[in-house]
Amino acid sequence: MATHRRRKVFTGLTMASSLAWMSILPATAVFAQSAPTVTPGSVTLSGPIQPTNGSATFTASASDPNGTAEYQFWVESPTGQWTDMQNYSPNNTFTLATPSAGDYLVAVEVLDQAQVAAGDWSLAQTTLPDAVFNGSTLSVVSNASGEVAKGQTVTLTATEANVFSPLYQFWYQEPDGTWVQSGNYQSGNTFTFTASQAGTYKYVAYVKSPLAANNPHGALQSNVGSQVAYGTASQVVVSPATQTVVADGQAQGQVTFTVEDSHGNRVANFSGTLTLSSNGAGLGINAGSMNDAGEYAVTDGVATATITAPTTDAGQTVSVFADNLMSAATGAGGTAGQSQVANINYSHATAAVSAAAPSATGILLMATPNDLSTDANATSTVWAVVTDQAGNPMLAANGYYVNLALSGGSATFLDGQTTDAAYMTSTTA
């Protein structure tokens, strides 16, 4: 079996020294008696990026028009040690066992059969190694926990496990669809870019060992992350657009108004005020977050109003709408997204709120005091309260009948019966 005394893959060898001796012979004699060779650039190697059931099979191919190609397979272990795993033979497949966690590199050298017999090792044709990742992982995250302003920098950090001497490369996609590369593979696991456009960015990282191919056959891909960059305030939208509030003066609904840029991203650094009003005299907009001018505070691009409806509004539908968005920052020095509030679109900032008449849908039992007595000679009072669909006590003067029952021990009603058709009033609790 032919053996190698040194590693020949990726050494940048040329054939000049090997052919120097041929210069003393006539050209016709040299080419008439030259041995068949593997066509340069014709060698390919393909295999899986991850093993299946602890092994990975690779297939090599090469063009050798006038002879028979022979293949030799080399493997770099997760510790960086290269080993000749399958010596020169016409067998162009190789199965690699991956007993340890980490990345393995598989390379192939190809010679014509006659070159192998002659020991012309320097004439071998090869490709960059393919990688196999067994139990290796790679993840990438952004340093921004939420949205960032247009023009802000974003730092990506990649974290790997079980990759020999890792090198990293990053890619990010701008909102217009353009992919941008971080550059050549590097040992640093961070990369910073500027979010120059408003919209959603996507990003991904790759990791490989130093000799692996700089392509999907040699590198492990991370998860694909996303980062939103918002622009200046452009519109105000509302959520939910429609809802129903029980008209009992107690039930509450919420309407959220969000300041967005032209791409529909929340302008997360917008602070200011928003005037809210309704076309229904009875519908109440909670004043808890209003200032003296009747304006709602906008914090992180959001203003939230609480809605209540008295019983007199039952059956009505009213509109709640926003207007007069004002920024807390003024002039050119304001924070991005805060100083430009002109021409705001309010077309989607109107919510329809329906006031539903309360109806008796539940029973709430309450003890007075809160704990029932454990004294067999004492009595405990339990109030049975009728509630509406919002879970609040019915305030109407109607009376309701309900069957009540006691169980456990010798508990009885005051009249000595175990069950009773008790009359309940909804006006007290």
Image: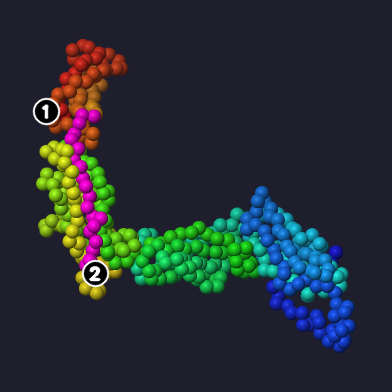
Q: Nearer the viewer, residue 64 or 418?
A: 64
Which quadrant of the figure has residue 149? bottom left
Say which residue appears at 63% left-offset and 55% top-offset. Answer: 50
Please, what is the three-letter code of the amino acid marked with disc 2?
Ser
**Residue 339's disc number:** 2
Say which residue appears at 26% left-offset and 18% top-offset. Answer: 405
Q: Is residue 408 magenta?
A: no
Residue beneath disc 1: 397
Secondary structure found at label 1: loop
Taking the view exactly as shown, the residue that stands out farthest to the top is 416
Q: Is residue 353 magenta?
A: yes
| x, y percent for residue 10 | 69, 73
Q: N-terminal of the two: label 2 or label 1?
A: 2
Answer whether residue 29 is visible to the viewer in this image: yes
Q: Which residues are magenta?
A: 340-361
| x, y percent for residue 177 | 45, 66
